[in-house]
Amino acid sequence: MKGLRIAVAATATAAALTLAGVASAKSPVPGKPGDQNIVEIAAGVNAASGEFSYLLGAVGCLTDAQGNNPVVALLTGSDKYTLFAPTDDAFKALQRALGVAAGSEAPEVTCTLGEAVVLDVLAYHVTEGRHFSNSVFNRKNTKMIEMLNGQYVVSNPDATLNDVAGQSVGVVLQPGLFNINASNGVIHVVDAVLLPFAP
């Protein structure tokens, strides 16, 4: 089950920009969960804006020959997760930093990192349970959040997350980009890919 949850991270990220169940910046906790799950939201956002092509491409790296995908299976289920979803620009920056894009960034380039690395990175973007921004970030103290790959991120009062690589990754606190209330979790859009290892 742990490996399955790890795989789910990428799909969850894609769901981040959905319009269903989105809270305004003034309301840290939205009302009832939306009707769509994390995967449905991600696919809908990508169809409308193309914003999660790279996230969905990373999730696609994990689809087997029979069409099964552990991330999709996890994020369409009934268990609750909180997802930190990197934008396309965040994935492009990661590809350049790792030297795998060679000036030609594309969603499928992420697959060249290998399935194990992609799964680890995606799992590092998902944590168990519904966590709205008011519980992710404490106004006075930092806190540790365990991700599905077993490692931690540090949440800071300024709405940033510190990853294992030492990056400060910002949650985009704009209406429609955080506290996205899916039927099976919560999505927050982030401005960089969280890394569970030093590049």
Image (cartoon, rainbow, N blue to C red):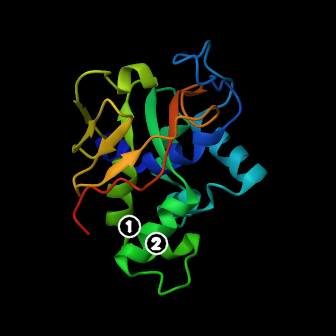
Tell me the quarter of the image containing the C terminus: bottom left
Q: Judge from the rendering whether residue 174 lies leftward or rightward of residue 146; answer left or right.
A: right
Task: Judge whether 50 appears above or below 108 on screen.
Answer: above
Q: Residue at image x 32%, y 47%?
A: 3
Q: Judge from the rendering whether residue 144 lies leftward or rightward of residue 129; answer left or right.
A: left
| Amino acid type for the residue under numbered disc 1 | Glu
**Circle 2 sits on which residue?**
111
Label 2 Cα crowd, 10 Å radius (few <14 / some 14-19 / many 20+): some
Image coords of residue 44 (percent x, y) = 72, 44
Q: Residue furthest right?
A: 48
- Residue 180 quadrant: top right
Q: Judge from the rendering whether residue 23 lies leftward or rightward of residue 92; answer left or right.
A: right
Q: Residue at image x 38%, y 81%?
A: 99
**Circle 1 sits on which residue?**
115
Q: Is mark 2 on a helix, strand or loop?
A: helix
Q: Residue at image x 51%, y 54%?
A: 69
Task: Judge whether 91 appears above or below 174 on screen.
Answer: below
